């Protein structure tokens, strides 16, 4: 019975995607140039499904959909092909677990794409790249300060206190060598307590470089020695820039709409639709 159900779901997905897949196979990436947003809209639910937990409130999924659409359109306008952007979603959905999970949540993600159709976020009339993370350390970060460019001045820091209630908000990473805590010096933090620079041995690294090097959940961390080990205590998950998915979901639970959620996290940006009008 299980094998029959799996085969049925796989067939259903293939049938639903067949027209789009055939377009790519027969015509190639040129069949979906940047100005043809229709094709991208049909694939958008698959992409967003891989970006945000399917258990989140619909309004929060809508907010993530607007972010995804904005980012994808920017990439397409810079010359990326839709087929390349779809490789990861299609590879994931080629497996049974991906197929069944997506089909269970399919209608919600399709509705999110439909209800926000064509909508993007813009700064001073132009689409702006939109970062997101799962949960911040209690506030989002200032984009210009973190990315060292005024180009990202639209990413202003906003308080997100609801994030402190997230499961896994605080986490420990232990290193067996106690001396490690003596070899690492935190040089600079931003106003939200994220580490901007750290000295590890003789090297100077950014907080994000150090986070990636040790696979830490966040660069909002402290370092201390405990019982012969080095303890790195982290708060939040992700880089802390832009949109907090957990925080947005908490706002959705309070009855906020996706446009209100986006306005909360991106107060300098404007929700625009349709995308082709500017």
Image: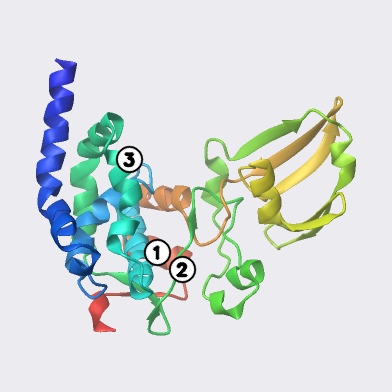
For the residues bearing labels 3 and 1, Cβ distance under 8 angstroms: no
Residue 92 circle label = 3
- Dividing the image into 4 quarters, which one contains the C terminus? bottom left
Disc 3 and disc 1: Cα gap in Å? Answer: 28 Å
Kindly report the distance in space between the C-alpha atoms of the residues bearing marks 1 and 2. Answer: 6 Å
Instruction: From the top left corner, tell me how far across and down residue 4 is, in percent.
Output: 12, 20
Sequence-first disc among 3 and 1: 3
Residue where numbered disc 2 is placed = 266
Q: Secondary structure at mark 3?
A: helix
Dot 1 falls on a residue whose secondary structure is helix
Tell me whether the residue at label 1 lies in contact with that at label 2, contact meaning CB atoms closer than 8 angstroms: yes
Instruction: Give the label, 3 or 1, closer to the camera.
Output: 3
Give the label on residue 262, or none: 1
Q: Is residue 173 above or below residue 208?
A: above
Q: Position of residue 97 (x, y in %)?
A: 29, 30
Which of 13 and 32 lies nearest the eye of the viewer?
A: 32
Task: Describe residue 3's horizontal placement relative to residue 148 as left or right.
Answer: left
């Amino acid at each position: 019975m299980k094998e029959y159900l799996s085969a049925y779901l796989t067939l259903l997905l293939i049938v639903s995607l067949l027209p789009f897949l055939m377009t790519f196979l027969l015509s190639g990436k040129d069949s979906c140039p940047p100005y043809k947003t229709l094709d991208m809209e049909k694939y958008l639910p698959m992409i967003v499904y891989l970006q945000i937990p399917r258990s989140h409130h619909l309004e929060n999924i809508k907010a993530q959909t607007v972010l995804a659409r904005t980012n994808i359109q920017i990439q397409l306008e810079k010359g990326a092909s839709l087929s390349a952007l779809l490789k990861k979603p299609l590879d994931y959905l080629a497996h049974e677990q991906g197929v069944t999970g997506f089909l269970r949540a399919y209608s919600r993600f399709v509705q999110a794409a439909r209800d926000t159709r064509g909508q993007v976020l813009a700064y001073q009339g132009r689409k702006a790249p939109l970062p997101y993370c799962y949960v911040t350390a209690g506030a989002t970060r200032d984009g210009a300060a973190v990315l060292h460019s005024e180009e990202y001045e639209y990413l202003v820091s906003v308080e997100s206190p609801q994030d402190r209630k997230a499961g896994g908000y605080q986490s420990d990473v232990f290193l067996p060598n106690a001396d490690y805590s003596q070899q690492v010096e935190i040089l600079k933090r931003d106003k939200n307590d994220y580490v901007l620079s750290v000295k590890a041995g003789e090297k100077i690294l950014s907080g994000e470089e150090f986070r990636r090097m040790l696979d830490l959940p966040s660069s909002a961390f402290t370092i201390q020695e405990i019982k012969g080990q080095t303890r790195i205590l982290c708060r939040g998950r992700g880089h802390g820039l832009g949109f907090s998915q957990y925080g947005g979901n908490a706002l959705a639970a309070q009855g906020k709409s996706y446009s209100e959620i986006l306005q909360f996290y991106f107060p300098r940006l404007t929700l625009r639709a349709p995308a082709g009008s500017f």
